[in-house]
Image: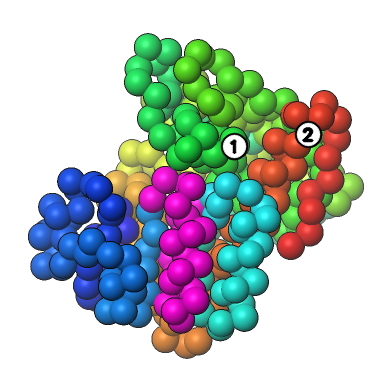
Amino acid sequence: MHAPAFHGAGAQIQGVYAQGSPRARALAEAYGAKVYEDYGELLENVDAVAIATPDAAHVPLALEAVRRGRHVFLEKPVGLSLEEARSLLQEAEARGVVAMTALTARADWGAETAFQVRERLGEVVAFRGAFLADYLADPQAPVPWRGRLAGGGRAGVVGDLGAHLFDLTAWLLGKPLEEVIARTEILFLGRENPDWAGILARAGQTWGSLELSRVHPVRPQRLYLEVEGDRGALRVLLALAGRAEEAAVFWSERPGAWEPLLLDPGLLRGRNPREPWGLFHFRELVRRFLRAIELGEQPVPSLREGVVAQAVIEAVLESSLEGKAQEVEGV
């Protein structure tokens, strides 16, 4: 998804580095780029890097890039822990480089439309949401890197899908998640990190419930959020599967029934809503990233917003481990 999005935005793909991966050469050849066997050599020949590796490699690769003054487009979650995510943020801000976290919900047609009308809610009184997927729903399938500590760390689904849901929730609420009460579970043998999480979360004085699953028998995957206010309620269904035009937003008066809202065509920004979800979302994130480099400012969602989501991930894991409420550390 990264390569066609950057190529389509006019960036030159200079090289590909993927230590020990047979896919690197095919990807490089598709864009007339070079395969680098040494990451440092690649960094000498680029202005920016897009890091789309297993989670354990995110911060080490990003830190090396930032220390050489390279801009960074980084997959989520930022890292394996809040401590290492903070170390990257501190380094990036000290060096003045542009750094973005690829939180694709921020570029969803439905989510952006919902954000534009959220003031209609009045005072927010409750929220609920979930990110449900089936990519590890087969108990007999081989366990990929996402299910192992060496690749996906201890977070499992909390890092993989939670990063999206936590950021989306804070964005639409207009305030960060500050406290969580959580339970996580490994549902199938052989996995080393959670398959499922149930979370009560507080933002300001408002409580809500969030659920994460990578073993839910649902296809396509489903990411949704409902926000209730004293004047009405919003429900957004994101198109993080299928075509981008399949996103939907609903409004309900208080009291009332759900009524669909038209998605704002002005938010397409030249994108084709019939494109597959990934390319549609990454085109917008890449546009923002390149524009931020041009203007010398931080993009949205920035690395800092990715670290804020990392703080929620850590709080969820600690709450589940200790069996009690956990405050989300500030960033």
Type of amino acid at the residue the image marks with label 2:
Ser
Label 1: how many Cα within 10 Å (few below 14, some 14–19, many 20+): many
**Would you say 169 lies left or right of 99 here?**
right
Of pointers 2 and 1, the one earlier in the residue sequence:
1
Q: State which quarter of the image contains the C terminus.
A: bottom right
Residue 290 at x, y percent in the picture: 39, 76
Visible residue check, residue 328:
yes
Q: Are marks 2 and 1 in contact (CB under 8 Å)?
A: no
Residue to which mark 2 is pinned: 319
Residue drawn at point x = 82 percent, y = 26 percent: 323
* Residue closest to the eye, 262 or 299: 299
* Residue closest to the eye, 16 or 254: 16
**Quarter residue 7 falls in:** bottom left
- Residue 56 highlighted magenta (yes or no): yes
Type of amino acid at the residue the image marks with label 1:
Ala
Visible residue check, residue 11:
no
**Would you say 81 lies left or right of 262 here?**
right
Residue drawn at point x = 50 percent, y = 67 percent: 63
Residue 296 at x, y percent in the picture: 50, 87
Which secondary structure, mark 2?
A: helix
Q: Residue furthest right?
A: 205
* Residue closest to the eye, 219 or 53: 53
**Quarter residue 196 falls in:** top right
- In the image, the segment drawn in magenta is 53-76
Q: Residue furthest bottom?
A: 295
Which secondary structure, mark 1?
A: loop
Residue to which mark 1 is pinned: 155
Residue drawn at point x = 42 percent, y = 45 percent: 54
Label 2: how many Cα within 10 Å (few below 14, some 14–19, many 20+): many
Residue drawn at point x = 49 percent, y = 74 percent: 66
